[in-house]
Image (cartoon, rainbow, N blue to C red):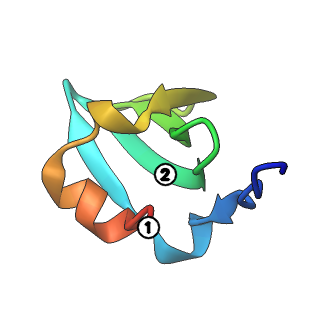
Amino acid sequence: MAKNKKKVINLSEQNITFVENERHIKIISFNPNTMEVEVSISETGEKTKKVTKLPFAHLSKDIKKLIKPN
C-alpha cells in the first residue's frame, strides 16, 4: 500500500514573516512530505532577494504554530 503524498501548502498569502540576524524572511510554502519550508530572504537595506529552502525544525515555535503541519 502506497503512502498518501500530501500537497505543498501555499503560505504566501498569509504573510508570515520574521527577522533573524538582520535578514527579513518570508515563508512562501510548506512541503509536509520533506518537512521543509520555502522562504524568501532579503537583507536589511538591500533589494536583493533569494529564495531557498529551510528545514521546518529550524523555525521558532511561534512560526511553527502559524504553519500547523498537521
Name the residue at 25% across, 65% down: 65
Name the residue at 64% across, 44% down: 33
Q: Residue furthest right?
A: 2
Q: Nearer the viewer, residue 15 or 67?
A: 67
* 59 left or right of 49 in image: left
Q: Name the disc covering residue 62, or none.
A: none
Amino acid type of the residue tagged 2 in the rendering: Ile
Amino acid type of the residue tagged 1 in the rendering: Asn
Quadrant that contains the C terminus: bottom left
Quadrant of res 16: bottom left
Q: Can the viewer see residue 62 in this picture?
A: yes
Percent coordinates x, y for residue 7 in the rendering? 75, 61
Q: Nearer the viewer, residue 16 or 5?
A: 5
Disc 2 element: strand
Residue identifier under label 2: 27
Q: Residue furthest front?
A: 1
In 3D space, how far apart are the residues under numbered discs 1 and 2 (Cα atoms)?
17 Å
- Count of numbered tags: 2
Q: Nearer the viewer, residue 45 or 16?
A: 16
Q: Nearer the viewer, residue 47 or 30?
A: 30
Disc 2 residue crowd, few under 14, some 14–19, many 20+, Cα 10 Å: many
Percent coordinates x, y for residue 62 in the rendering? 16, 59
Disc with the residue nearer the chain's start (1 vs 2): 2
Name the residue at 71% across, 59% down: 6
Q: Name the disc covering residue 70, or none.
A: 1
Front of the two marks 1 and 2: 1
Q: Can the viewer see residue 49 in this picture?
A: no
Disc 1 residue crowd, few under 14, some 14–19, many 20+, Cα 10 Å: few
* 65 left or right of 68 in image: left
